Image (cartoon, rainbow, N blue to C red):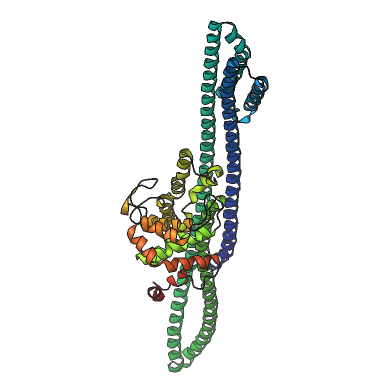
Amino acid sequence: MNSFLNNLKLIHKVNIVFYISIVVIALLIIIFYTITNMMSKNLQNSYNEQIKIQKYSNEITDNLKLLDYLTIENSLTKQKNYKKKSHDAYEAIFKNLKYLKESEFFKNTPDAKKVINHINNRLLGYKTITDSFKEEVEEDFEDGLFAVLALSTTSHIISDELKTLNGYIKDIFAKKTLKVQEEIQEMRKKVIFSILIIFLIMLYLNKRIVNSILTPLTQLKDVIASFFDVLLKKREHVLDVVYNANDEISSIAKVIDTNMHIAEDIVLKEREESKKVEELVEFKTKEISELNHELEATQREVIFTMGTISEERSKETGYHVKRVAEYSLILARLYGLSLEESLLLKNASPMHDVGKIGIPDAILNKPGKFTDEEFEIMKSHAEIGYSMLKHSSKSILKAASIVAYEHHEKYNGRGYPQGLKGEEIHIYGRITAIADVFDALGSDRVYKKAWPLPKILKLFEEERGEHFDPVLTDLFLDNLEHFLAAKENIETNDDNLALSKYIEDFNRVENIL
């Protein structure tokens, strides 16, 4: 009994462990978010430095071309402002070159520094040629030809070395980007692994404590009931002896009967104690059940929070993931998925863009069109998100890994990252693709303004069977009012008419859909 009561006390400890676990998970997410933000800012600074260096390199090339033109023009017709123009061009070149030499961008790239020094030395030789070019052309035809050849050769060599330097600039930034992505991915794996371990520990503790309480209780109830039944049968036998035996035996029986009264009182008191214990167990079992529900709610909250991290980095609000989740639920039910599976997709869909955590801010928040190289980096967010989630055995995270991996696949097979076609794409991916594109087109982004609704609907009609599943597209267009109502409910924080509020009630679903 003491052991059993001690087990009940463990529930209070589990409550403490549970809340500590929530705090630890929150801290892990905050630390991860803070560090990745710092890494992204460093990468952004590196990107800005790359753009600046590229600009200076291009200015050197432009000024070099200008000097070629000015030098030859001055040799043919005397130019009044030649000295000033050439002086300004040389001053700009050497100023830019000085910045390239002192830049921390090339700190760990000695080959690039060598190229800069070569360019500097060749520019000194180039200046010597341009300073005496006019006199040599005018004094002797043969010397003039050599001067033209030397000017052209030196200019060409410097241009080639500038192209080589530009190649180093791109390689350095690409390596820095790759390094940051790898560090973020490694940190992300550690955070997710830690969160999963905490969840598993909590589930294990709950299961052990429930078993440790319920098993002894069942045994105790059986023992008490059995003892009480035996006691009553013995008392009936004693009463028979009291009224039918001789005086000596009757006296003994009366003593026994009296003692059995006392025993019966003891048993009744034990039963009352047992009832109290049973009520306590029932209360604590209910508490454990509520704890489990709270744990599940926390899982959903953690998933939603991780889904919004990437949206916040791309200057989006949590409304995007909320709307995508709501649209996915509605479309899943319209398609005929079970209530359980539809709710699973709703809870998993906020993680569709979680892989954007690994994309640099310089690319993620770029207001203009991506270069081919930048678009390839951007596309990698689907595989990054999948690699984060694919190892989990939890159904919600398994569903989230599918959504993250396949929501950019196209029905015609021209999507990414796998190029899946038709029903090769999981139904979760096909549903989320429609929900994500519908919300993205109707929302302001850093690179575009929100589209008007007629333009969005026209695109869906054009992309039916191309980008989007034709059956799902028809269901979406035929039931558009539900999706528009869901959007309004979320944006006004009024969920009284939200479809998901009623969709969990089987009796009302058919009337609504």
Q: Is residue 288 shown to the viewer in this render? A: no
> Percent x, y for residue 370?
49, 42
Judging depth in this view, the residue of 48 and 302 nearest the camera is 48
Judging depth in this view, the residue of 39 and 272 nearest the camera is 39
Q: Residue furthest front?
A: 77
Q: Quadrant of residue 7?
A: bottom right
Label count reads 0
Examine the rendered structure and indicate whether residue 424 appears above or below residue 227.
above
Judging depth in this view, the residue of 342 and 330 nearest the camera is 330
Examine the rendered structure and indicate whether residue 174 appears above or below residue 444.
above
Residue at x-position 53% and y-position 16%: 152
Examine the rendered structure and indicate whether residue 109 appears above or below residue 204.
above
Residue at x-position 58% and y-position 19%: 73
Judging depth in this view, the residue of 347 and 444 nearest the camera is 444
> Percent x, y for residue 488?
51, 67
* Quadrant of the frame with the C terminus: bottom left
Examine the rendered structure and indicate whether residue 19 appears above or below residue 390.
below
> Percent x, y for residue 277?
54, 74
